[in-house]
Image (spheres, helix red, strand yellow):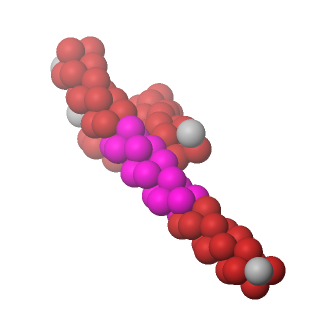
Amino acid sequence: MVNVENKKNKQKGKMMEWDFVVASFVNLAVNLSYTILALFVAVIALVVIDKKLLKGVDIQQELKANNLAVAIFASAILIFVALIICFGMKA
């Protein structure tokens, strides 16, 4: 009788572990899809802002000319993208 209960408890424990693994993968998939969607929207927003506000500025050319303001702006964009990825995977 005790052996039967021990087997049931072990099976129940394995089932709980499997449920935890499945829930973890589902959570990972949801967070990853949210991150990709947020990154996609952010990149589109940055492209629209770049085309509307910075019509006459060639970022690559300004970086080659050692323009510090453009370098700070470009690095801010990269930090923005990194934050989206970080918060998306953290949730």
Residue at position x 38%, y 38% from top? 34
Q: Residue 86 location, x and y as percent? A: 54, 44
Residue toward you, 65 or 58: 58
Q: Residue furthest top?
A: 53
In the rendered structure, which segment of residues is drawn in magenta?
19-36
Q: In which quarter of the image is the C terminus?
A: top right
**Quarter assignment of residue 9:** bottom right
Q: Quadrant of the N terminus?
A: bottom right
Is 34 situated left or right of 21 in this image?
left
Residue at position x 21%, y 15% from top? 52
- Magenta residues: mostly which secondary structure? helix
**Is 9 placed above or below 16 here?**
below
Q: Which residue lies furthest to the front in this view?
A: 1
Residue 43 appears in view: no
Q: Residue 2 location, x and y as percent? A: 80, 80
**Quarter assignment of residue 81:** top left
Is 58 situated left or right of 83 in this image?
left
Q: How many labels does the image show?
A: 0
Q: Residue 35 location, x and y as percent? A: 40, 41
Residue 47 appears in view: yes
